[in-house]
Structure formats: C-alpha cells, structure tokens
C-alpha cells in the first residue's frame, strides 16, 4: 500500500509550502538594486505614463544606459548588467529612441521587437527572453509594453484574471534574481500612482514598485517631469521632479521642494525694496505667478527666516503682515587717506544712514 505523504500531495498539486526559516535562508536579507532605488533584483517594477507624451521610454532608456555603464542614475548607484529589451515600437521609431539615448551601437543591449514575436505566444516569448538573459548574464529584462506582448486585447486588459495570467510567466525570472521592468500606458484621465495605469488594478498589485511619470508643467516642449513612486522596498521618494538635461535625467528635488523654490523666486520678483512700499501677504501671493496660498505662505516664512525679507504686523483688521526686501547699508571705510563707500548687505538693517 502506497503511503502518500504531505510532501507528495503538495507536489502533485503543484504547490510547495516553506517555513519562514526556509524562505529566509534561501533569500538574502540584503536588497540588491539594479538601479537604486527603483529597480530591485528579483522584483518587478512598473513604469506608467500617457502614451507618446510622458517620456516614460526616454526615462527607461536613460536608466538602461546607466546600468550598462554602471553610472549613477539621478544621483543613485546602479549595478552593471547587460540588458534584454522587448519593444512594441517599429524599428524606425525605436532606432531614433536608442540613438537619442546613446544605445544605438551597444552590443550588450539585446532587442526583441514585437513584430518578430507574432508567431509565438506570451509564455514562449518569456521563455526565449529568459534563455537570452541566462546566455548573456543579464539581470534586467524590460518589456514595453506588457499588455501588448501578453496579447491583452480590448477589455481583457481590464480583467484581473487576465492581468495575473500575463504576469505569472515573469515570476520564473524574478525567482532567479532577474529584475523585470514592465511598461504600461495611463488612462487618458490619468490618476495617482497605482491607479493611473490603464486596465485592472491587478497589474499594479503584481508589481513591487510602481513609477508614474507625467509632464511637469503642462508645456509640451518642457523636459521637466513629475515622477511619483510607491514601493514595497524602502528608499524611493514618493514624489520627485526630474529634468532631462543633455540626455541625462537629473533629480531637481521633491515636488514640494521645487514648488517652494519656485515660489521664493516669484515672490522676490514682486516684493518691494523698502518698508514704505511694503506689501500685504495676500497681495504678494496674488501677484506672484503660479504661487498658491499654502506654498506662498511657507515661502514667505522661509524668506523671512533666511533674512531675505523683513516684515511688520499691521494693526489693521486681521492684523496682516507686510513684507519688504531689506536695503543695503552704506558704510565708510578709510584707506590711505582716501575715503571709500562700500555696499554691505545685512539681514537686519533696512535704512540708509546719512553722512
């Protein structure tokens, strides 16, 4: 009589339970980044943005170049690795994209075009990509876009079961420590990171890190982008402003920091340079281009603390504050019997003494 143990039963069912100790001993506690803090070895990251408008592919290709050369990406380190890249773009447009990214002559950047996979199903494509990663020692697979390669047509992109079925083949790569970056398009209406990507929320639930990229200021010619991120790993700033400069993305700071810096610049343009013409808080914020009340008040407070502005509280109704820029002091210096007048900027004195 055959004795069927629990292990055999689990094997027949295609499932395998592990103790917490077994899992912990099998996986290093150290998080290995391919591109810190966004792309982690053995994890899935998703980049989403509006089609042909957000710059998500420009962002991804810039990251790829940094990984290939082990150069910092937006101030963070990367791990050197060859890359396997699946693209839905036609050859002509992708040739332009990789040329702009400085990848057009790379031998360590392997490309699989969608047009060359039409006779294969999604699982076969993933198997081929997995084999190529093993062949060249790649620890990074990029898929642009996942719904396109997985054959998600029409309403199936909105179906959670279909979404999970598309993600499942990728788990074979992540279990071997390969990082996977997938690209999705946003809804036309956009949304917050985690909700912006088109289709079922199961797409986002399957990823360990979600990155959403939007235009920074509504100007179609601007290179500034807002990057929002949520992750199961520590490190990524939630909201960042980035800029493409000479083919490299530069982090300008968090969205709040950048808005505050810009507000300070705009406020200093409108605040007068003498106490007699001091302006009330509300009038300053109204006159400062693109500055809202909350950020405007914070900017005024910081400018005062820095000594860039002076203020006085009125006795009028509501006791509003009035602000002005401090004037320079003129002092006398004597040198070799010749008197010079030197302009000295101070933080506290706002008057010009007489001589």
Image: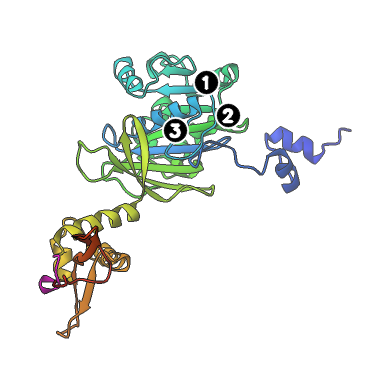
Magenta stretch bounds? 272-278
Seen as rendered, the residue at the extreme right is: 1
Binning the other alpha carbons within 10 Å of mark 1 as few (below 14), some (14 to 19) or many (20 upward) gives many
Give the numbered dot on residue 129. 1
> Where's residue 256, x and y in %?
33, 56
Residue located at (64% from left, 42% from top): 30
> Where's residue 90, x and y in %?
32, 18
Seen as rendered, the residue at the extreme left is: 277
Q: Is residue 276 above or below residue 285?
A: below
Mark 1 vs mark 2: which is more N-terminal?
1
Q: Quadrant of the C terminus?
A: bottom left
> Where's residue 60, x and y in %?
40, 31
Q: Is residue 308 visible?
A: yes
Q: Is residue 145 above or below residue 40?
A: above
Q: Is residue 35 above or below residue 333?
A: above
Mark 2 secondary-structure assignment: helix
Residue 272, quarter of the rendered image: bottom left
Mark 3 secondary-structure assignment: strand
The residue identified by callout 2 is 173
Mark 1 secondary-structure assignment: helix
The residue identified by callout 3 is 182
- Looking at the image, residue 36 sits to the left or right of residue 222; the answer is right
Is residue 260 magenta-colored? no
Instruction: Pick whichever, 179 or 88, lies toward us.
Output: 179
Residues under numbered marks 1 and 2 in contact, where contact means CB atoms less than 8 Å apart: yes
Instruction: Pick whichever, 353 or 2, lies toward us.
Output: 353
Residues under numbered marks 2 and 3 in contact, where contact means CB atoms less than 8 Å apart: no
């Amino acid at each position: 009589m055959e004795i069927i143990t629990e292990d055999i039963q689990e094997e027949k069912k295609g499932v395998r339970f592990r103790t917490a100790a077994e899992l912990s001993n099998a996986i290093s506690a150290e998080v290995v980044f391919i591109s810190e803090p966004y792309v982690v070895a053995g994890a899935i990251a998703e980049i989403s943005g509006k089609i042909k408008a957000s710059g998500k592919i420009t962002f991804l290709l810039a990251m790829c170049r940094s990984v290939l050369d082990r150069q910092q990406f937006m101030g963070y380190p990367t791990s050197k690795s060859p890359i396997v890249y699946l693209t839905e773009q036609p050859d002509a447009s992708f040739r332009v994209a990789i040329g702009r990214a400085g990848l057009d002559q790379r031998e360590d950047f392997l490309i699989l075009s969608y047009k060359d996979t039409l006779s294969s199903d999604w699982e076969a494509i993933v198997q081929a990509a997995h084999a190529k990663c093993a062949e060249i020692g790649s620890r990074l697979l990029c898929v642009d876009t996942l719904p396109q390669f997985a054959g998600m047509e029409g309403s199936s992109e909105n179906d959670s079961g279909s979404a999970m079925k598309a993600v499942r083949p990728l788990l074979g790569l992540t279990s071997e420590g390969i990082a996977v970056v997938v690209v999705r398009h946003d809804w036309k209406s956009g949304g917050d990171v985690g909700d912006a990507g088109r289709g079922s929320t199961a797409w986002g639930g399957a990823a360990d890190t979600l990155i959403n990229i939007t235009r920074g200021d509504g100007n179609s010619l601007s290179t500034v982008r807002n990057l929002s991120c949520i992750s199961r790993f520590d490190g990524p700033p939630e909201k960042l402003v980035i800029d493409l400069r000479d083919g490299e993305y530069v982090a300008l700071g968090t969205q709040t920091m950048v808005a505050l810096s810009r507000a300070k610049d705009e406020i200093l343009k409108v605040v007068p340079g003498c106490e007699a013409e001091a302006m009330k808080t509300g009038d300053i914020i109204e006159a400062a281009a693109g500055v809202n009340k909350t950020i405007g008040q914070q900017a005024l407070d910081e400018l005062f603390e820095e000594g860039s502005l002076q203020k006085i509280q009125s006795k009028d109704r509501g006791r509003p504050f009035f602000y002005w820029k401090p004037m320079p002091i003129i002092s006398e210096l004597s040198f070799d019997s010749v008197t010079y007048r030197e302009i000295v900027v101070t933080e506290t004195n706002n008057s010009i003494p007489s001589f």
